[in-house]
């Protein structure tokens, strides 16, 4: 069956018919040729547009694992025209989506910016908080509550905030992601808008933090009902399945299947199952990336990004790679197919920007918020130590241990984010010695299978552990939002993934190990050298490098340094 690419159709329409929403800004034929690099300001050279692309859960090695089948203008263009920082590391633990996106755009770490996880516990009250939740705002674009979100929990500025400040708020900043946190946190406090996907309606929505009503171009985009259109096409492999040699044979026991299907194999008849799932099923297919790129094109057209006398910024996060990775794991045909599809769509997106903004007039960087581990059962079956850590069972046994000693129930609320979160209100009410409790918990945990270290957050700098771990623990510890003890598992161990009849399926992330912390970082376009760098760089360096490129102040919590080799 011939695969339809509505993304490519929308690209061709955008290039050759100009934007219907802005008839006065037709694409000049001159832009269809290789234009000489231009600047957004006659006084200070800057790119017309910066596009930050975060590929959720993209391991660094995906740049090369599927390289032989990438097209010439997608990932290969980034590598062959741009500058690749080959050894970029996440500076902290735990490694999750919200702190990852926040670190990229703030140049800071949870100890400073406060986003300690996707969810975290307010230590003073014991209340669990979602990173971008905000009940003071309302949904715009849907009747659901999915829009009750804002960046209010973020304690620092972002590089996008600093761009707005530097241009007296004339620069436009737009954040886009299926996940609310992937759009909101990069757009910062002053972004013109952030848009995310609403499973209930299939619409792209926002909140009253940004606006009272969706712009007409977003309404027009929603009216196309693209989520349903894509799901009706089914997820068919781009190439014959037997040619996917970089992954396991299809129907691996390490993969999680969709409800309503017989096996975790391609093709997936999304047309037959999406009504029982809802339109949110698109998140777990490559079409989630497609529709996100579609909206990015619509945003560039609708907001005329890159057409102003100051630099604009589009912060785009591609979330489906994370959902697919969690379900199928690192070694699945579905992952290989997803990245080969994404490669084609990035190529089309770059070609569109060449025409719309002008080749050499925009800067793009591509990175990830974290990586992912191999499936634990897969590693075990190949003789590599690995296993699943049951945090719920450990929490219950730890509480039982503490009850026997202190005669108080449920002193531990959660082991979420690989941290011990105590019921501080109960400890205070019962007049217990918290330091003694922490010591007892550390002694107990370090006797448990799979735990390499249990570290007192307040005294991490003196812990008898490798320096790399000490630094990441200190950087990841938010006094207000993190637990009191950081748990470090043995390599190959993790928690938080599903289980099938033959053992655990899929994968996850969150630890200090290279498979979670070694991320891709590639720059391309205006002001960027061509080359690569093998010395260690850091996630915190990204915002500092972009700030140096734009000649603006670094975010107010940034601890990163510009990667000077990247910049012309």
Image: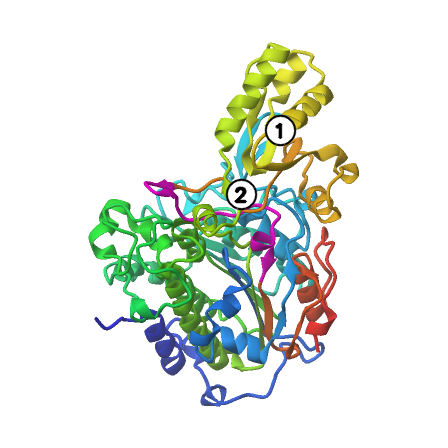
Where disc 1 sits, the SS reads loop
| Residue 502 at x, y percent in the picture | 34, 43
Return the mark for residue 175: none
- Quadrant of the image containing the N terminus: bottom left
Q: Viewed as shown, does residue 299 lie left or right of 480?
A: left
Q: Is residue 399 left or right of residue 435?
A: left
| Viewer-side residue, 100 vs 508 | 508
Please identify, in this view, whether the residue under mark 2 or under mark 1 is nearer the observer: 1
Q: Is residue 18 magenta?
A: no
Q: Which type of secondary structure does the marked residue at label 2 adopt?
A: strand
Question: Could you tell me residue 296's position as x and y percent?
Answer: 45, 65
Q: Quadrant of residue 415?
A: top right
Does residue 122 sit above or below 118 in this rendering?
above
Which quadrant does the C terminus fall into? bottom right
Residue at 71% x, 24% y: name it.
Answer: 439
Q: Is residue 201 left or right of residue 321?
A: left
Bounds of the magenta segment: 499-519
User: What residue appears at the point 39 percent right and 46 percent down from the top-left corner?
Assistant: 505
Which residue is identified by label 2? 493
Check the image and report above or below for 121 versus 497: above
- Can residue 300 be seen in this snapshot? yes
Q: Please name whichever residue, 552 or 255, is drawn nearer the observer in this view of the structure.
A: 255
* Mark 2: few/some/many CA within 10 Å (<14, 14-19, 20+): many
| Picture disc at residue 447 | 1
Q: Is residue 367 above or below residue 262?
A: below
Q: Can the viewer see residue 217 in this picture?
A: no
């Amino acid at each position: 069956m011939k695969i339809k690419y509505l993304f490519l159709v929308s690209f061709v329409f955008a290039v050759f018919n100009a934007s219907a929403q802005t008839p006065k800004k037709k694409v000049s034929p001159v832009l269809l040729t290789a234009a000489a690099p231009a600047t957004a300001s006659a006084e200070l050279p800057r790119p017309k547009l910066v596009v930050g692309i975060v590929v959720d859960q993209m391991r660094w090695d995906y740049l090369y694992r599927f390289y032989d089948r990438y097209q010439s203008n997608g990932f290969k263009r980034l590598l062959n025209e741009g500058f690749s920082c080959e050894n970029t590391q996440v500076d902290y633990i735990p490694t999750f989506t919200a702190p990852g996106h926040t670190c990229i755009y703030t140049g800071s770490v949870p100890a400073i910016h406060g986003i300690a996880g996707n969810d975290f516990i307010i230590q003073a009250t014991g209340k669990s908080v979602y990173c971008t939740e905000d009940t003071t705002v309302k949904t715009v674009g849907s009747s659901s509550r999915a829009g009750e979100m804002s960046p209010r929990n973020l304690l620092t500025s972002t590089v996008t905030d600093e761009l707005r400040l530097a241009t007296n708020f004339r620069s436009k900043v737009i954040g886009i992601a299926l996940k609310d946190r992937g759009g909101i946190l990069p757009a910062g406090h002053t972004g013109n808008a952030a848009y995310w996907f609403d499973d209930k309606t299939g619409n792209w929505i926002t909140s009253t933090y940004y606006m009272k009503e969706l712009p007409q171009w977003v309404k027009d985009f929603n009216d196309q009902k693209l989520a349903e259109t894509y799901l009706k096409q089914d997820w068919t492999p781009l190439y014959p399945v037997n040619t996917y040699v970089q992954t396991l044979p299809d129907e691996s026991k390490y993969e999680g299947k969709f409800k309503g299907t017989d096996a975790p194999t391609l093709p997936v008849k999304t047309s037959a199952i999406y009504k029982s799932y809802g339109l949110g099923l698109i998140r777990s297919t490559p079409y989630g990336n497609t529709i996100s790129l579609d909206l990015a094109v619509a945003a560039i057209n609708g907001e005329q990004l890159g057409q102003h006398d100051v630099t604009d910024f589009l912060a785009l996060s591609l979330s489906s790679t994370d959902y697919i990775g969690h379900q199928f794991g690192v070694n699945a045909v579905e992952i290989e197919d997803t990245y080969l599809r994404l490669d084609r769509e990035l190529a089309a997106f770059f070609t569109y920007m060449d025409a719309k903004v002008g080749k050499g007039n925009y800067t793009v960087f591509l990175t990830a918020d974290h990586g992912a581990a191999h499936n634990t059962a897969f590693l075990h079956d190949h003789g590599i130590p690995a296993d699943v850590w049951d945090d719920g069972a450990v929490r219950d046994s730890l509480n039982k241990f503490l009850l026997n000693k202190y005669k108080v129930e449920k002193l531990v609320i959660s082991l979420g984010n690989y941290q011990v979160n105590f019921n501080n209100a109960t400890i205070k009410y019962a007049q217990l010695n918290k330091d003694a409790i922490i010591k007892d918990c550390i002694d107990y945990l370090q006797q448990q299978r799979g735990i390499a270290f249990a570290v007192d957050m307040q005294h991490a700098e003196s812990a008898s552990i490798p320096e790399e771990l000490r630094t990441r623990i200190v950087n990841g510890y938010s006094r207000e939002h993190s637990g009191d003890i950081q748990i470090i598992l043995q390599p190959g161990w993790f928690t938080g993934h599903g289980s099938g009849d033959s053992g655990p399926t899929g994968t996850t992330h969150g630890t200090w190990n290279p498979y979670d912390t070694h991320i891709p970082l590639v720059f391309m376009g205006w002001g960027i050298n061509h080359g690569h760098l093998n010395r260690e760089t850091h996630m915190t360096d990204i915002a500092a490098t972009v700030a140096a490129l734009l000649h603006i102040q670094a975010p107010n919590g940034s601890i990163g340094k510009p990667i000077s080799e990247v910049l012309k």
